[in-house]
Image: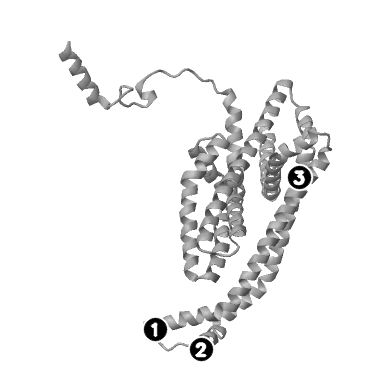
Amino acid sequence: MPGWLPRAMVLALALVGCFQLGSWAFHQLVGLLINVLIAFFLALAVEPAVGRMAARGMRRGLATFLVFFAVLITSAGFVVMLGSILAGQIIDIVESFPQYLDSVINWINQTFHTELSRVAVQDSLLHSDWLQKYVQNSATGVLDISTTLLGGLFRLLTIFLFSFYFAADGPRLRRGLCSVLPPARQAEVLRAWEIAVAKTGGYLYSRGLMALVSGVAHYIMLEVLDVPYAPALAVWVGLVSQFIPTIGTYLAGALPMLIAFTVDPWYALWVLGFVVVYQQFENYMLQPKLTARTVDIHPAVAFGSVIAGTALLGAVGALIAIPAVATLQAFLGAYVKRYDVLDEPRVRGGGRGAGGGGPFVGWLRHALRRERA
């Protein structure tokens, strides 16, 4: 046996062990890494407001606290307002549920010539096996729901804590990062940081515009149907559908449908149809154009980046995919060497004025020139 073979085997085993240990540590810390990534983009989003307040003489830590406190107060007020509306509508639905049930039973009796009664239907529902099983499963799942809520609150606290440190200690963080790099690399890092702040702000600006358009459109629809609390519901639809990825559209449309059902069950179907139609308009017409103008990326790239981000990181990836891709594209654009484009019809897009029309048209033009000659 060669003398180097045992050392090579030990080295290979050590490398495999280090790889397994690193893979295990990464899978254990992937949740924390995603939280840090969300906190970093959140800090980039509040960076312009914090920077303006710090430039006027306010301490950066106090400016960051005021910005986050304003966001927290606004979010809490919005949740409390909609919670009170939802609670009142649920009470109305429960109180008027016997009337809805009577109307449904009367329609069934008249249409199918049956003799159903509300008391019999209620007794059959209350004594059914599936209802008892559902109650038992719900009772056993209360602990799981509580654990999930506590875990979600802890995750939100972690994200806000990291984002506060990133925003408050932004200059110190940049100085610490640049201190281990040569001057040329320091300029690149600072430029990339500025681009990330600009693109993240542009992304939030585009989302805010789409939330405004969505809120106005749904407000008009709810006012036409005479649904109560139309302004609050329009704000709910606009914000939730734009700032909660993947399931935001369904959450946004569920509340107006529920309240419209208390007015007239058919109104709920009208609201559902409008939400579906508007969502298609937003996905294929409004969102690509607004995103392309504010974030400066192609609509197809924006759509593909959202799909890729969702496949990699789920809802978090869908939320940060567009600003991340826009930052990477703008940063790498400085290193791409560009040349002058040839002045040819194929580059201009063809057409009659550009000399296009295909081979047959070209042959016909050549034959006409020969006859004139």
Residue 118 is situated, as x and y percent measured from the top left of the image, at: 51, 86
Q: Residue type at mark 3?
A: Val
At 70% from the left edge and 28% from the top edge, which residue is drawn?
Answer: 190
Q: Residues within 10 Å of mark 2 (few under 14, many from 20)?
A: few
Residue 107 is situated, as x and y percent measured from the top left of the image, at: 42, 80
Whether 305 is drawn above or below 338: the answer is: below
Whether 365 is drawn above or below 24: the answer is: above
The tag earlier along the polypeptide, 1 or 2, is 1
The tag earlier along the polypeptide, 2 or 3, is 3
Q: Residue type at mark 1?
A: Gln
The secondary element bearing badge 1 is classed as: helix
Give the foreground label among 2 and 3.
Answer: 3
Give the foreground label among 1 and 2.
Answer: 1
CA gap between label 2 and label 3 equals 58 Å
Residue 265 is situated, as x and y percent measured from the top left of the image, at: 49, 70
Whether 37 is drawn above or below 2: the answer is: below
Quarter of the image holding residue 33? top right
- Residue under pointer 2: 120
At 80% from the left edge and 35% from the top edge, which residue is drawn?
Answer: 54
**222 on left or right of 38:** left
- Residue under pointer 3: 67
Q: Where, quadrant-wise, is the C terminus in this rendering?
A: top left
Quarter of the image holding residue 133? bottom right
Q: Which mark is residue 145?
A: none
- Residue under pointer 1: 110
The secondary element bearing badge 3 is classed as: helix
At 71% from the left edge and 41% from the top edge, which residue is drawn?
Answer: 46
CA gap between label 1 and label 2 equals 17 Å
Quick check: can you spot residue 283? yes
Q: Residue type at mark 2?
A: Ala
Question: 25 or 5: which is nearer to us?
Answer: 25
